[in-house]
Image (cartoon, helix red, strand yellow):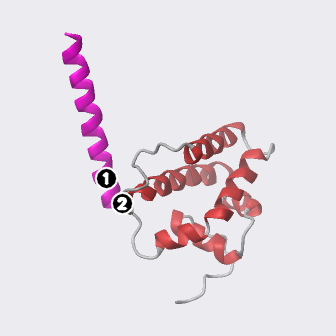
Amino acid sequence: MWKDVLIGLAAAVVVSWLALVVALLLVRPKGNLLREALRILPDLIRLLKNLATDSSQPRGVRIRLGLLMAYLAFPIDLIPDFIPILGYADDAIIVTAVLRSVVRRVGLEAVRAHWPGTDDGFNALCKATGLTPHPTDPAPPAT
């Protein structure tokens, strides 16, 4: 009986993982979006640290950001990083989801106040995560 339960559980985990891989293939970043995300990665990490250590932010936001940083530091991912495109796409999708939830809670202005990089970098972050940049932020350069 336990053998059947373990086999069923293992099958469910494999099917769930395959469904996740298919979903990531469908929503993976396209074109230069992934390159832009990698370009702003150092500033993004500093942003997460700055927001997570700011005691004026709500506790839930700080906990969420701390868990995100722990997930990013943990060597085991949902999709291993050696798989081309998808290995980093899962991290990008999770970061995007957490940043969107943070912006819904504290507002884009609070995130902008903690952004350590350039205005172009912040606009690239907004573009990569689908956030609307502040109207006073300069527009990204035309390419």
- Left or right of 20? Residue 135 is right
User: Which one is in front, 41 or 104?
Assistant: 41
> What amino acid type should be assigned to the residue bearing mark 1?
Ala
Please provide percent x and percent y for residue 27.
36, 60
Using residue 80 as the reference point, say whether residue 55 is left or right of it.
right
The answer to which of 88 and 83 lies nearer the viewer is: 83
Given the current orientation, which residue lies at the most extreme right position?
A: 55
Q: Quadrant of residue 126?
A: bottom right
The image quadrant of residue 58 is top right
Main SS of residues in magenta? helix
Q: Secondary structure at mark 2?
A: helix
Give the residue displayed 69% in from the left and 42% down from the top: 62
Q: Check disc 2 and give the amino acid type.
A: Val
> Are dots 2 and 1 in contact, CB under 8 Å?
yes
Q: Residue at x 29, y 39 (%)?
A: 16
Q: CA distance from mark 2 to mark 1?
A: 6 Å
Q: Which residue is mark 1?
A: 23
Residue 107's disc number: none
Q: Is residue 40 above or below residue 53?
A: below
What element does badge 1 sit on?
Answer: helix
> Is residue 26 rendered magenta in the image?
yes
* Residue 99 belongs to the span the image colors magenta: no
Which disc number belongs to residue 27?
2
Q: Position of residue 30 (x, y in %)?
A: 39, 71
Magenta residues (range): 1-27
